[in-house]
Image (cartoon, grey):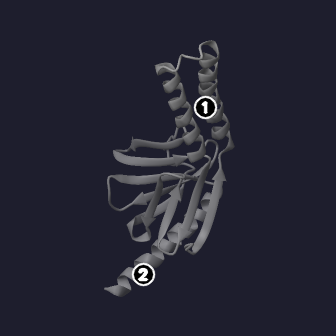
Amino acid sequence: MEKKAEYRETIYWKEIVVILGVFSALFFGMVIRVYMDRPDAWEYPSILFISMGIIFAFLAVNFRKLDIALTDNALEVGWMYPKKVIPWSEIEAAKTDKDSGLIVLGFGIRGTRYEGKWVLVYNVIFAKRAIVYLKTGKVQIFVFSTKQPEKVVGLINANINKANVDGQSDD
């Protein structure tokens, strides 16, 4: 059953599919080339090249899109695998990443430290980002790419306030 989402977004990352697809094709091409030269040469390099081709193909499929959903209960951000689900009660604040000073080099899933705190980043090259500050856990800052950071941050902060009001009324 599909969860009701207040906001849903998908960022398709075509560049990574092309780059990893090329590497995968090169590895499979090496196997074909070795096998054409020596049909009886089904040895270690062939198995290595096939394995690397499969790994790159999996990475291309896995990182082809980043899904973002704001549901009634949580913020959900992720690739095919892994997905990060953060309940509203675990989020302290959110803001856009315009002047944070946090420099995110690279793409995909990254872990780093910033101002003494662990940061988890789900990043697509050239995409704008939102920053979520968490109350507990080893990772205290979660950064993710989004097409509409102002809208996403506004909805996150509204859901945090709603969760805080609901939590206080339960006491």
Can you give x and y, in whole percent of width and height, for residue 16 in the image? Answer: 63, 39
**Would you call the spot at circle 2 few (<14 residues within 10 Å), some (14-19), or many (20 or more)?**
few
Question: Is residue 6 positioned above or below 57 on the image?
Answer: below
Residue 26 drawn at (x, y percent): 63, 25
Name the amino acid type tagged 1.
Ser
Mark 2 or mark 1, earlier in chain: 1
Mark 2 and mark 1 residues within 8 Å of each other at the beta carbon = no
Instruction: Please tell me whether mark 1 sits on a helix, a strand or a loop.
Output: helix
Specify whether residue 63 is in view.
no
Residue at 53% across, 16% down: 41
Q: SS of the residue at dot 2?
A: helix
Q: In the visual, does 9 lie left or right of 144?
A: right
The quarter of the rendered structure image containing the N terminus is bottom right
Label 2 and label 1: CA atoms lie apart by 51 Å
Q: In this view of the protein, can residue 69 be seen by the observer?
A: yes
Residue at image location 58% in from the left, 38% down from the top = 57
95, above or below 154, in the image: above
At horizontal 61% and vertical 27% (from top left) the residue drawn is 28
Q: Is residue 12 left or right of residue 98?
A: right
41 and 99: which is toward the camera: 41
- Tell me the residue that label 2 is attached to: 165
Q: Within the image, what quadrant is residue 130 found in? A: bottom right
Q: Residue at x 56, y 65 (%)?
A: 69
Q: Quadrant of residue 50?
A: top right
Decide: is 87 above or below 61. below
| Type of the residue with mark 2 | Val
Q: Nearer the viewer, residue 66 or 59?
A: 59
Residue annotated with mark 1: 24
